[in-house]
Amino acid sequence: MSVLDRFRLDGRVAIVTGASSGLGVAFAQALAEAGADVVLAARRADRLEQTAELVRAAGRRAVTVETDIADPEQAQRMVEVAVEQLGKVDVLINNAGIGTAVPATKETPDEFRRVIDINLNGSYWAAQAAGRVMQPGSSILNISSVLGLTTARLPQARTRRVKPRSSASPATSLSSGAPGRESASTRSHRASSKPR
């Protein structure tokens, strides 16, 4: 038995969100090549059919479901369609996600809420709906961007130093990074201002 045989998904059913482009297409195709039938979910229904053709070319069944993952009812419907048409859900790939290309200091509340609704809440709604029907041994994979860990010098990640109010307070920066994460300039300032 080869190593790849150990990763076969014959007889399994997988859901891929964000399956209309990019990594979602690649995940769907790989799952089909490994033997899984695949439910393809995305907002852009017209592009889902192209992904479905790739799944069918691998000899597997494909079901497309137009889904805005930010809507809990649509996430639930996605899972219901999977069960109705393919009998079960064994794998969920939470891949749907968006980003903004504006500096964090200029992002509007509505832009930020849309990112959170899809990237965070949407993953939760999909996992919740799938978890209700999954059996032991099933898997949920949450895909995230490397931008959660690095700024990659993108415009939305630019930082600026804020002058400390007193020599005892550390430098701070404005960043689009995760809460509780400090910027390199803050770490550098903190290290250089320690008493010797």
Image (cartoon, grey):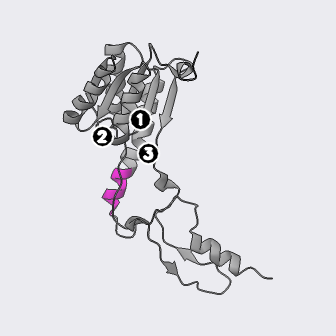
Task: Measuring from the top left, give residue 107's x and y in whole percent.
Answer: 34, 64
Residue at which label 3 appears:
120
Q: Judging from the image, what secondary structure is the residue with disc 2 in? A: loop
- Name the residue: 26% across, 38% down: 43
Residue 125's disc number? 1
Magenta-drawn stretch contains 113: yes
Q: Marks 3 and 2: CB-CB under 8 Å?
A: no
Task: Measuring from the top left, give residue 69's x and y in whole percent.
Answer: 34, 37
CA gap between label 1 and label 3 equals 9 Å
Kindly indicate the quadrant of the structure image that contains residue 28. Answer: top left
First in residue order: circle 3 vs circle 2: 2
Quadrant the C terminus occupies: bottom right
Relative to 18, residue 155 above or below: below
Magenta-highlighted residues: 108-115
Q: Judging from the image, what secondary structure is the residue with disc 1 in? A: helix
Task: Measuring from the top left, give residue 87's x and y in whole percent.
Answer: 38, 12
